Amino acid sequence: MKRMIPTEAASRRAVIAKARAMNALGLNEGTAGNVSARHGDAMLITPSGTPYDTLTPRMIARMALDGAGAWTGPLKPSSEWRFHLDIYRARPDAGAIVHTHATHCTAFAMLRRPLRATHYMIAAFGGPDVRCTDYAPYGTAELSALAVEGLRDRHAVLLGSHGMIVIGRDADEALWRAVELETLARQTYIATQMGEPVVLPDDEIMRTVERFKGYGLNATRETPRATGKSPSPAKGRRSPR
């Protein structure tokens, strides 16, 4: 199958669509989160402090991946641009990044608690847990280093006293994982109110990680796509069975 690379215009539209969708889905409030997409040797990222419903494609900031923070566009990039840039440099598999302050994920991050394998959908994030980092101020190199290390061999991380980061091969997958991560955090919270959740064995989760590679879009998609479509909670890929 021929590899199809999205146009920059399509990637810009996808960033806006996912930023709006994460708020509509209850994953974020206001402009606290941010979304980016890789495009060639650059990244496209939501601007700082700009309501998502007012965004137009030309407002999305463009930053070279080999640069030191220089950007082009009418608005300055998100204050969290540094960890987006460093994640793309460290993770060639990342085609898009979603960062939110989703309520349940942030609650676990405030407690410095990782999410463990109390449900097999933890495998959607590449291993038997989703780590939680220590705290570092937003926008700093210290926070960026913590995020990159926390994402080692994973597709998601909780930032201590801050929120979540998820990566995907494209904007669709990144937002889907953000929905799944908040769902898992909410389920874990509810389960802990009822008792002590059972943690599944690591080897079982790693088998599930491998099985997930052959399901749905994972089985047919060869390259990152950037579209304006957003997953619906009712129609999302909650369980790849």
Image: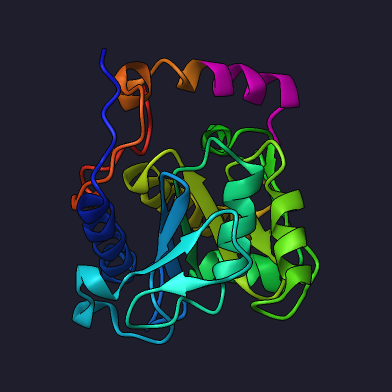
Q: Residue at x 69, y 75 (%)?
A: 161
Picture coordinates of residue 80, whole percent (x, y): 57, 73
Answer yes or no: is residue 232 visible. no
94 or 235: which is nearer to us?
A: 94
Residue span colored magenta: 199-210
Q: Quadrant of residue 116?
A: top right
Image location of residue 19, percent across then percent down: 32, 66
Image quarter where the N terminus lies is top left
**Would you say the magenta stretch is mainly helix, strand or loop?**
helix
Residue 209, magenta (yes or no): yes
Q: Measured from the top left, where is residue 98 in percent x and y?
A: 46, 58
Going 41% across and 44% down the picture, which residue do you hit?
A: 40
- Name the residue at 44% across, 43% down: 95
Residue drawn at x 23%, y 77% is 55
Residue 79 screen position, x and y as percent: 54, 79
Say which quarter of the image contains residue 237.
top left
Q: Is residue 16 highlighted in magenta?
A: no
